[in-house]
Image: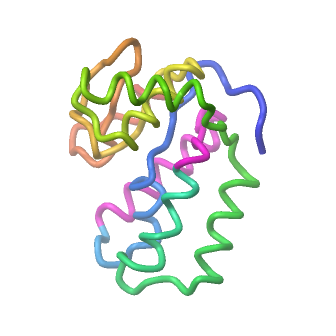
């Protein structure tokens, strides 16, 4: 599903999508399921196309037990059919390259940030950035922190 994103959209990073499938981390699994379901029901969740691409690898190689390639493919298809997916353009690649050093991002993280910024997202849900950091209008929130308040985020 592609198209216009909801006002105050919340970009969802790869790690948030992976944990519901990772039985070796029960607390993060439970939290990720709760966050994803709440964000989906609120109509606020958005997935950058890059995250869909990144999602497959940890499902088949990093989680315990890994999913079969067929099951991982089904998981990717479910998210791509059920969530708004934002494409990444050449403009975002250029913005990511320019800002990676300036903001001390890894390139792939910079690309998620650039897509979120371009789309006007209010926040990125991820454990890969400093929680509470705001960069050029994009807020990074770690949904796995004990003090994370999803109700406040969804207001």
Q: Residue at x 60, y 22 (%)?
A: 119
**Looking at the image, residue 2 lies above or below residue 90:** below
Query: Which residue lies most toward the top here?
Result: 136
Q: Quadrant of the N terminus?
A: top right
Residue 46 highlighted magenta (yes or no): yes
Looking at the picture, how far across and down is residue 97, in whole percent?
Answer: 39, 29
Residue 4 place in picture, x, y as percent: 75, 26
Residue 138 part of the magenta segment: no
The residue shown at (55%, 40%) is 39
Q: Which residues are magenta?
A: 27-50
Eyeballing the image, is 97 above or below 64?
above
Foreground: 107 or 33? 107
Q: Nearer the viewer, residue 29 or 51?
A: 51
Quadrant in the rendering for residue 47: top right
Render colour scheme: rainbow
- Number of disc labels: 0
Q: Quadrant of residue 70?
A: bottom right
* Place of residue 69 in the rendered image (x, y in percent of width and height, measured from the top left): 59, 83
Note whether 121 is above or below 105 in the view shown.
above
Residue 97 in the figure: left or right of residue 44? left
Question: From what the image shows, is residue 108 above or below residue 17?
Answer: above
Left or right of 53 in this view: 61: left
Which SS type dominates the magenta stretch? helix
Quadrant of the rendered image containing residue 140 = top left
Residue drawn 52% across the image and 50% down it: 51
Q: Position of residue 96 (x, y in %)?
A: 42, 29
Left of 47 or right of it: where is 148?
left
């Amino acid at each position: 599903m592609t198209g216009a994103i909801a006002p105050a959209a919340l970009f969802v990073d790869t790690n948030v999508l992976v944990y519901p499938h990772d039985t070796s981390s029960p607390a993060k699994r439970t939290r990720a399921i709760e966050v994803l379901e709440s964000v989906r029901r609120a109509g606020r969740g958005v997935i950058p196309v890059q995250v869909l691409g990144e999602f497959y690898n940890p499902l088949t190689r990093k989680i315990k037990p890994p999913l079969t390639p067929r099951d991982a493919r089904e998981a990717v298809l479910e998210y791509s059919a059920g969530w708004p997916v934002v494409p990444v353009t050449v403009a975002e690649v250029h913005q990511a390259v320019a800002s990676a050093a300036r903001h001390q991002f890894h390139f792939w993280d910079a690309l998620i940030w650039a897509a979120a910024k371009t789309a006007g997202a209010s926040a990125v849900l991820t454990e890969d950035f400093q929680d509470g950091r705001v960069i050029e209008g994009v807020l990074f929130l770690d949904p796995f922190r004990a003090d994370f308040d999803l109700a406040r985020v969804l207001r």
